[in-house]
């Protein structure tokens, strides 16, 4: 008989890491555990500076560690807190470093909210099919509203946020409050009634429908069909500012514009602020001043050109031209007259000189004398014209001499 000596069978030994990885693969590959809803009560909630949520879901007999990454928390429509019963959706996996099986949550809602959400989706689909949310029905907002209606609770923080924002951005705007409950069974009818009361204001430019944040139950009044129809029947554009940025209601889809918060609704309602108006008025004033200066400069230039044309065609210019021509003619006449007189004077001097040369006085200056009878003044040119003792007058060049002829004149 042959005998064989086999070594005893050795058990398979895993490292902790290998086993942890195997368990994680098993958890993550299970069809149920990859898409699971879990109901429980939040406890040991913590949210470090990273923004991730870490807490435990528990019931009367067990507890489960849960993680919700920061990127998923933005989809929450409520504020998680210890003691709150929730329904969480996610996938199971293993956290190897801590050796913990955890639920990694991507969606979470308070218990009972799931049914409300499904009802919200059904109503939204039906109204959308009716065309109530059609983009062509959306009306543009006025650029400069003068009268804004506000539908919200008179005691809520949303009203103060809206008024503070409007007062800061556009203090000239007139605000009319149509107070109404915004939560509870009586809220939908109150909201519809508020729209009816604002319809009586003919000078209204815009309506803000607002409420602060809350759970889906708190905001359920704005998921009412009658409210949606009242929004579409409004005679002026409607801005819906309900809840926080992550909250969506039927009113948001029915409104002409959805704002993430009541404060944002007031900002959207006043696209032009008082500062914008002041800057625009200043720009208009500067532009008017520039246009006025340019216009005045052009008119002044036109006036100068007109004056020049008028002066060229003015009788005064022709008169001045005639006067100048007259002055020039007078000057030519005066020159001609002076020239003529000078010529005449020269000619006269020549004639005088010729006359002087033949003048008796000239002869007398040469030593001759003129003798005449003293009584008859008859010239005596011959001797037979004289007699003894005859009185005669002798004309010399420098005067006359009286004389008497003596002796015989034979």
Image (tube, grey):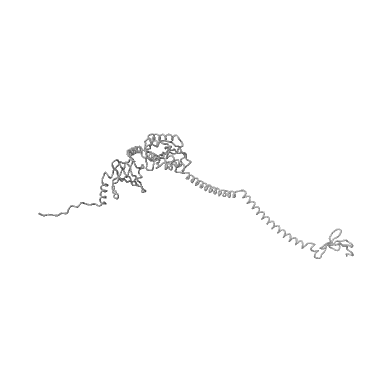
Eyeballing the image, is 30 above or below 389?
above
Q: In this view, does 236 lie to the left or right of 367?
A: left
Eyeballing the image, is 380 above or below 34?
below
Point out residue 119 in the picture as x, y percentages from the top left corner.
33, 37
Q: In this view, does 159 lie to the left or right of 310?
A: left
Q: Nearer the viewer, residue 314 or 209?
A: 209
Q: Quadrant of the N terminus?
A: bottom left
Q: Quadrant of the C terminus?
A: bottom right
Point out residue 62 in the picture as x, y percentages from the top left corner.
28, 42
Q: Nearer the viewer, residue 367 or 258?
A: 258
Point out residue 223 in the picture as x, y percentages from the top left corner.
36, 37
Q: Is residue 101 left or right of residue 388?
A: left
- The image quarter in which residue 236 lies: top left
How many marks overall?
0
Point out residue 69 in the picture as x, y percentages from the top left corner.
33, 47
Q: Which residue lies furthest to the left in this view?
A: 1
Q: Nearer the viewer, residue 111 or 41?
A: 41
- The image quarter in which residue 353 lies: bottom right
């Amino acid at each position: 008989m042959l005998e064989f000596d086999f070594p005893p069978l050795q058990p398979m030994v895993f490292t902790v890491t290998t086993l942890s990885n195997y368990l994680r693969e098993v958890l993550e590959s299970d069809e149920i555990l990859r898409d699971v809803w879990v109901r429980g009560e939040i406890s040991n909630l913590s949210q470090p500076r990273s923004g991730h949520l870490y807490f435990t879901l528990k019931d009367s007999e067990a507890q489960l560690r849960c993680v919700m990454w920061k990127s998923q928390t933005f989809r929450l429509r409520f504020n998680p807190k210890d003691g709150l019963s929730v329904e969480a959706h996610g996938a199971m996996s293993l956290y190897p470093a801590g050796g913990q099986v955890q639920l990694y949550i991507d969606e979470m809602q308070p218990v009972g909210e799931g049914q409300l959400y499904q009802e919200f989706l059904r109503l939204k689909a039906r109204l959308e099919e009716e065309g109530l949310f059609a983009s062509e029905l959306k009306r543009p907002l006025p650029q400069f509203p003068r009268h804004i209606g506000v539908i919200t609770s008179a005691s809520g923080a949303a009203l103060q946020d809206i008024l503070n924002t409007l007062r800061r951005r556009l203090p000239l705007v007139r605000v009319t409050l149509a107070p109404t409950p915004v939560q509870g069974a009586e809220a939908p009818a109150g909201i519809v009634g508020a729209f009816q009361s604002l319809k009586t204001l003919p000078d209204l430019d815009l309506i803000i429908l607002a409420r602060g944040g809350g759970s889906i139950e708190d905001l359920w009044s704005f998921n009412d069909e009658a409210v949606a129809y009242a929004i579409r029947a409004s005679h002026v554009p409607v801005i819906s500012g309900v809840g926080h940025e992550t909250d969506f209601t039927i009113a948001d889809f029915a409104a002409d514009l959805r704002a993430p918060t009541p404060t944002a609704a007031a900002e959207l309602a006043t696209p032009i602020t008082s500062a914008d108006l002041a800057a625009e008025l200043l720009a208009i004033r500067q532009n008017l001043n520039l246009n006025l200066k340019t216009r005045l400069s052009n008119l002044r230039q036109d006036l100068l050109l007109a004056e020049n044309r008028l002066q060229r065609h003015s009788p005064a210019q022709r008169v001045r031209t005639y006067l100048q021509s007259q002055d020039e003619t007078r000057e030519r006449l005066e020159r001609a007259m002076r020239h003529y007189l000078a010529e005449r004077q020269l000619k006269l001097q020549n004639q005088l000189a010729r006359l002087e040369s033949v003048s008796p006085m000239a002869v007398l200056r040469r030593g001759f004398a003129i003798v005449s009878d003293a009584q008859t003044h008859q010239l005596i040119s011959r001797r037979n014209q004289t007699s003894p003792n005859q009185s005669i007058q002798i004309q010399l060049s420098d005067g006359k001499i009286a004389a008497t002829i003596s002796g015989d004149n034979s």
